[in-house]
Structures are given as C-alpha cells and as structure tokens.
C-alpha cells in the first residue's frame, strides 16, 4: 500500500480546553475523493484546520507527506471583499504566490497557467470581470481556480456549495470529479445525497470519526457510526437529513 498524503492516528483536538475531536484516525491516500459529513458543531471544520496545520492536536499524531504549499484550500464562504477592485484573472493568478515550491517561471508561463485554469473552470468569458459583479457560483468557481492553479497534490474544500444554486452544485461536483484524476480531494459537505455520486469514500465526523471505504452507505451503517439519518426522496436521488447524533 502506498504512503498516505495525510495520516492521522488517535488525534484529539480541543478549543479552549474543550474537546472537539477525540481519538480520530484517518489516512488520506493519493487519488482518493473523501466526502466528510456530519452535524453542525460536530468537528468537520476543525478536522480541516488540523490538516491545514492551523490547529495542533492535544493528543495523537498527524503526519503529512505533502507540504502546505502542495495543499489547495477552498474555505467556507468567500474571504474576499466584493468591493475590492480586483478582477477574476487577478484573483486566480494570486494563487500562484501560494505555491511556494512551484517555480513561477516567466511572465508567459504565468499567463499560460492562468489561461489553462480559466478554461478548466469555465471562466474564460469572465476573466476581466470585477469580483463584485459575480454571482455566488461564479465567485466560487473563481476561488476554486485560485486553489488549483498551483497544481496541488491535495485539495481541501469546506462546504463549497454554501449560498449557491442547485445548477452550480451539480457543475461544481462534476468538475471536482474530473479534477480527481490528478488531485486528491477532501470535501466537507452537509448533503450526503448530493455528493454520493461523486465521492469515492466517506467519513462521518461527530466528535469521533468513522471512515467508510465506499461512496454507498446505508442508514443502518450510519446508525452504527452514531450518525442516524432520515432518507427523503427528491426524485431519483435520495437526500439524507441528519437527526440528533448520539455519542457513546
């Protein structure tokens, strides 16, 4: 078996001495596409921040074979001021500055990299548009492009479908599935029904973490993982809504 990009063993994480994650074990391997689900306050974002090195465990270990510069990150909600006079192209190009191990090359190299990334996310026609004039979905595409322009080995996304419409959700996950051919992805979402067709494996986080090596999971299995759900049909695709999560 290959060496994991991220290996977490028996990790506890606390905020102000309050335990948020306990005894978490997870290995993130090359080319995986992990969906991370769980209730609000269950520790999903804390897990992401730990992987990004923003929070240190109080117990256990977190080892990585990827450097911070090899991790692309799309946070929950845009961190940009939409009144700031910057264009789509300029936002995307700024992502090159964060790929510290990547040679920025010549001006032409940078231009070609930006052009290719604009094409990948379907923003060619909007390259000169100010970010204040973008829709929610267009802004998320821009931020995704910024996260992938330096060719990361691992892409981490924290609920990227927040405040966007259903059409963009489908387009986003289709694009992520394509990107997964060359990039390992860890995706935090509140909607297992939406992400199930696109992910490869699943982690349920509610203080503890339960990993499921498949994108198909039953209500009975989630109950065993202390993640009981109700299944509500929306056409041909089941939509699962979390009930109260119980700890042992």
Image (cartoon, rainbow, N blue to C red):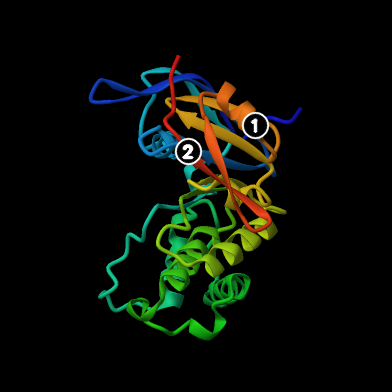
Question: Does dot 1 land on a helix, a strand or a loop?
Answer: loop
212 over 79 or under it: above or below? above
Answer yes or no: is residue 198 visible.
yes
Where residue 141 sits: x, y (%)? Answer: 50, 68
Which image quadrant is residue 106 in? bottom right
Q: Is residue 152 above or below residue 247?
A: below
- Tell me the tag on residue 4: 1
Q: Nearer the viewer, residue 16 or 209?
A: 209
From the top left corner, tell me how far across and down residue 240 is, in percent.
Answer: 55, 44
Judging depth in this view, the residue of 231 and 124 nearest the camera is 231
Eye-nearest disc, 1 or 2: 2
How many numbered discs, if any?
Answer: 2
Quadrant into which the C terminus falls: top left
Q: Depth check: 89 or 32 in front?
A: 32
Q: Residue furthest right?
A: 1
Residue 153: tell me if it is visible.
no
Residue 77, image x and y in percent?
A: 37, 57
- Figure quadrant of residue 90: bottom left
Along the line of sight, the residue nearer the viewer: 201 or 98: 201
Question: Does 79 sit above or below residue 217?
Answer: below
Sequence-wise, which precedes: disc 1 or disc 2?
1
Task: Estimate the x, y position of residue 207 in percent, counting from the top left.
Answer: 42, 25
Residue at 47% across / 38% down in the picture? 242
């Amino acid at each position: 078996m290959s060496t994991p990009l991220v290996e977490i063993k028996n990790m506890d994480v606390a905020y102000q001495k309050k335990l948020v994650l306990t005894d978490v074990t997870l290995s993130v391997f090359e080319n995986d596409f992990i969906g991370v689900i769980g209730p609000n306050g269950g520790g999903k974002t804390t897990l992401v921040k730990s992987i990004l090195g923003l929070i240190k465990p109080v117990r256990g270990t977190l080892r990585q074979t990827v450097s911070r510069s090899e991790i692309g990150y799309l946070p929950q909600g845009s961190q940009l001021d939409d009144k700031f006079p910057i264009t789509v192209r300029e936002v995307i190009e700024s992502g090159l500055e964060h790929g510290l191990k990547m040679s920025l090359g010549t001006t032409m190299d940078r231009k070609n990299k930006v052009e290719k990334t604009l094409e990948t996310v379907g923003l060619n026609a909007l390259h000169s548009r100010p970010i204040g004039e973008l829709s929610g979905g267009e802004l998320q595409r821009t931020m995704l492009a910024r996260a992938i322009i330096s060719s990361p080995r691992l892409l981490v996304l924290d609920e990227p479908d927040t405040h966007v419409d259903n059409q963009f959700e489908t387009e986003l996950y289709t694009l992520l599935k394509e990107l997964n051919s060359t990039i390992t992805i860890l995706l935090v979402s509140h909607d297992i029904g939406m992400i199930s067709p696109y992910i490869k494996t699943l982690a349920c986080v509610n203080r503890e973490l339960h990993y499921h090596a498949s994108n198909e999971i039953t209500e009975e299995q989630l109950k065993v993982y202390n993640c009981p759900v109700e299944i509500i049909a929306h056409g041909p695709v089941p939509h699962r809504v979390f009930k109260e999560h119980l700890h042992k």
